């Protein structure tokens, strides 16, 4: 049996630092303490004088306490019986997405979990709870360091052979150019076949879970009377079995009605080797029609936002569609990549550039998740980051605003580009660096466009300082996820760029930051320009040099982050499995 041990106390305590954002009205109070859920006292050490064992327990407790468990009870009273039945079917699909994603992180995960269950290790319940929280034995808040066992998480997760190097992959494609499309597809895993590498379609490799997921989608389609939802569910069921997602993504863009469900393979964050392979996930949400209507006006400014970018015309992208619906929603269930670790507060999908150029992309803000994070994390964090008079400026609506405009920014700037005379995409050229530049770009461009909306009178310009203070503190919330994670690294390069521009100073007496709002506003414009050029050039080496220069933290930032251990890093929402 594989032996499971905790990593060093120092590594775990250092991990007390991560996020994937408004109305917390639907979140129940108070937050449940993790130790009330995982009763470690029932399995305390046989020898409480064993200092090493006590230290291990305390380290595991500190790791678990980074997540505040929040019982989510969104108001779904407006749903009828058929709509509830559809959601219950989709919740089951979400559980199947979790089964797949558990294996996308490592195909050994189910066996490793069984070993923990069968073992007699100290603190077994706590270790098992952490395993389930992170979908494996790696701490997602501490650069995926192992907390159980000593096996490092491969950069390529389970998308590639564990022993495969970047060079081997690239050399294979160079020698077998006919394999390039299949190997770089977002819907294949790479495996060894003797001395060869082969690409296996997702639909084949994950058939055990995709076939029942497709059946449940079809059953849900039979129940609903909403024609747009029926079309999406039917097409997405077919996509699961063919790996052709274009038509179902187009149908998803046309969804209307109270149920907003994004289910399938989307994000590439888990593939830290190349950023090619997509992870399965599910967001089962219900829309708030009044809040969605209030936000919808901003999509009408997307073309103006593109035109207003502070770059030459050649870097602007008017090829994408600007339809871009916006939904204010409450999440009622999750699945797959949406579940472990840092929780998503909003998403902008689909990622397929063909769909984006045809219809744009949809932005969904998860108001109940965002609200919980503002109340539990961002608002109390401000007093540790900013001098008192600036800390008091934070406003929840500007956390929501920055979140929305972050997602809008994903639809702006370079996407499909021409390099060396050939059509390509930013993501294909920047590979694993793309998500790191893209998340930082979306942050700073979101801020740039909120300031633009204030100049146009669409938002109150008198609240500019409140917005800028909220935005700046938000960088620290993201940097706590670790600056090797895409959102954390994107926040880090903003921080360092703003420091270089003199946008803030360290107040030695208060041991906090003091913002220079005028310089910060100018730095936001300048960084928006620079990061769009980095992406638009599609030059991997230049992007790497930019990140190497700016995606770092100085001693003051590290001091602030280290002081925040009294606050959770993120939340662990608990949703009802059935409505």
Image (cartoon, rainbow, N blue to C red):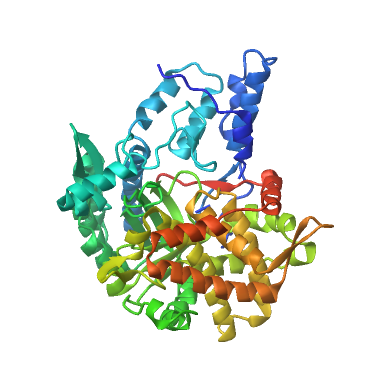
Q: Is residue 237 left or right of residue 546?
A: left
**Can you tell which quarter of the image residue 197 is in?**
top left
Residue 330 appearing in the image: no
Residue 157 appearing in the image: yes
Residue closer to the observer: 79 or 451:
451
Q: Is residue 258 left or right of residue 554?
A: left
**x then y, percent, for residue 343:** 50, 51
Residue closer to the observer: 157 or 461:
157
Q: Residue farthest to the left? A: 178
**x then y, percent, for residue 68:** 59, 44
Q: How many marks?
A: 0
Q: Residue farthest to the bottom? A: 456
**x then y, percent, for residue 363:** 42, 67
Quarter the N terminus occupies: top left
Q: Is residue 210 above or below residue 260?
A: above
Residue closer to the observer: 262 or 173:
173
**x then y, percent, for residue 411:** 40, 71
Q: Is residue 390 left or right of residue 239?
A: right
**Can you tell which quarter of the image residue 166 is in?**
top left
Q: Residue farthest to the right? A: 509
């Amino acid at each position: 049996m594989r032996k499971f041990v905790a990593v060093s106390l120092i590594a775990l305590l250092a991990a007390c630092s991560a996020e994937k954002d408004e109305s917390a009205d639907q979140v129940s109070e108070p937050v449940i303490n993790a130790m009330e859920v995982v009763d470690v006292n029932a399995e305390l050490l046989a020898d409480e004088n064993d200092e090493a064992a006590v230290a291990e327990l305390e380290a595991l407790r500190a790791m678990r306490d980074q997540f505040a468990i929040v019982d989510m009870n969104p108001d779904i009273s407006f749903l009828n019986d058929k709509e509830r039945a559809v959601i219950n079917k989709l919740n089951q699909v979400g559980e199947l997405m979790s089964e797949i994603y558990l294996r996308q992180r490592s195909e050994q995960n189910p066996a490793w979990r069984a070993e923990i269950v069968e073992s007699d290790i100290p603190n077994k319940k706590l270790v098992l709870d952490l395993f389930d929280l992170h979908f494996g034995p790696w701490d997602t808040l501490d650069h995926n360091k192992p907390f159980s066992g000593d096996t490092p998480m491969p950069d390529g997760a389970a998308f590639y052979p564990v022993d495969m190097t970047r060079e081997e992959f690239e050399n294979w494609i160079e020698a077998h150019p006919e394999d390039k499309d299949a190997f770089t597809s977002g819907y294949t895993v790479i495996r060894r076949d003797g001395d060869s590498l082969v690409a296996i379609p997702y639909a084949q490799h994950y058939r055990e879970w995709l076939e029942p997921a497709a059946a449940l989608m079809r059953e849900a389609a039979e129940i609903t009377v909403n024609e747009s939802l029926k079309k999406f569910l039917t097409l997405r069921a077919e996509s699961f079995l063919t790996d052709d997602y274009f038509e179902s993504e187009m149908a998803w863009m046309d969804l209307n009605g109270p149920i907003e469900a994004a289910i399938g393979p989307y994000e590439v964050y888990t593939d830290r080797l190349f950023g090619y392979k997509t992870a399965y996930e599910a967001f089962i949400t219900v829309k708030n029609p009044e809040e969605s209507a209030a936000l919808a006006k901003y999509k009408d400014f997307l073309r103006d936002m593109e035109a207003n970018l502070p770059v030459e015309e050649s870097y602007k992208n008017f090829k994408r569609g600007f339809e871009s619906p916006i939904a204010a929603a409450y999440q009622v269930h999750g699945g797959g990549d949406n579940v472990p670790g840092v929780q998503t507060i909003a998403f902008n999908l689909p990622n397929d550039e063909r769909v984006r150029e045809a219809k744009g992309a949809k932005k969904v803000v998860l108001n109940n998740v965002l609200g919980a994070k503002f109340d539990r994390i961002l608002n109390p964090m401000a007093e540790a980051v900013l001098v008192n008079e600036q800390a008091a400026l934070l406003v929840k609506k500007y956390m929501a605003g920055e979140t929305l405009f972050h997602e809008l920014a994903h639809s702006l700037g370079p996407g499909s580009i021409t390099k060396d005379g050939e059509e390509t995409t930013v993501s294909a050229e920047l590979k694993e660096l793309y998500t790191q530049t893209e998340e930082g770009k979306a942050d700073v461009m979101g801020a740039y466009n909120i300031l633009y909306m204030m100049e146009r009178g669409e938002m109150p310009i008198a609240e500019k300082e409140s917005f800028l203070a909220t935005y700046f503190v938000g960088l620290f919330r993201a940097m706590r996820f670790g600056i090797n994670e895409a959102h954390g690294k994107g926040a880090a390069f903003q921080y360092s760029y703003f420091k270089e521009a003199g946008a803030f100073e360290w107040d030695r007496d208060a041991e906090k930051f003091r913002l220079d709002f005028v310089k910060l506003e100018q730095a936001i414009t300048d960084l928006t320009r620079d990061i769009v050029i980095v992406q638009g050039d599609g030059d991997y080496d230049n992007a790497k040099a930019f990140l190497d220069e700016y995606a770092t933290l100085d001693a003051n930032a590290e001091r602030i982050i280290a002081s925040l251990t009294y606050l959770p890093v993120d939340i662990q929402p608990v949703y009802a499995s059935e409505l």
